[in-house]
Amino acid sequence: MITYTKTTHDRILHLSYQVLRPGFSIAEVIFPEDQDQETQHYGAFDHRGEVICCITLILSTWQGKPAWWLRAMATAPAWRNQGIGTRMIRYLLEDLQESDLARPIWGMSPPILKHSYNRLPSTAIPV
């Protein structure tokens, strides 16, 4: 069973570090915005409570309007290509809507990730 939830930066830091910044020191992967009150962290956790996918959204602007910047998204290698990242994004979109925090999400993603975004509503994530 996989649980999708809002979480803290501390709970997802290790996975984000392992997947997105291998070879860097842990201090180099922590950004000041990670601890901002407005920043949203999401995680998918397996039945043991281990984080297997994570996303960080930072309050930003897109074309002059409030938006979220998808600063980090990582999925553990053993869990890739199973739709977990897509379900994680769907979960956070629902959570933002329910929390009255819905706004456009933008990101600078490598082309390999665009196939995941193509399965989502076109207004969700401009890439």
Image (tube, rainbow, N blue to C red):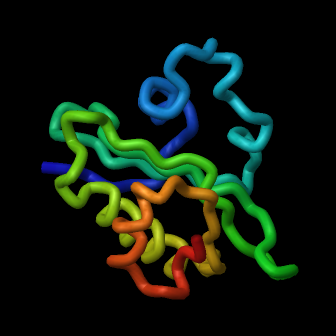
Compare residues 30 and 41 and report the one nearer the observer: 30
Q: Which residue sits at x=48%, y=86%?
A: 122
Q: Is 84 located above or below residue 127 in the figure?
A: above
Rendered position, 89 above or below 44:
below
Give me the residue at 69% from left, 56% from top: 58
Q: Give the residue at x 47% y 59%.
A: 111
Whole-percent x, y for residue 13 in the image: 52, 30
Which of the two residues, 114 or 15, is positioned nearer the viewer here?
114
* Residue 84 location (% of width, % of height): 26, 56
93 lies left or right of 108: left
Relative to 49, residue 27 above or below: above
Q: Position of residue 45 (x, y in %)?
A: 28, 42
Which residue appears farthest toward the right when viewing the image? 64
Q: Quadrant of the C terminus?
A: bottom right
- In front: 64, or 96? 64
From the viewer's perspective, tell me whether residue 4 is left or right of residue 74. Answer: left
Up-down relation of residue 64 to residue 73 (above or below): below
Residue drawn at (62%, 62%) of the image: 107
Q: Give the mark count.
A: 0
Is 120 displayed left or right of 104 in the figure?
left
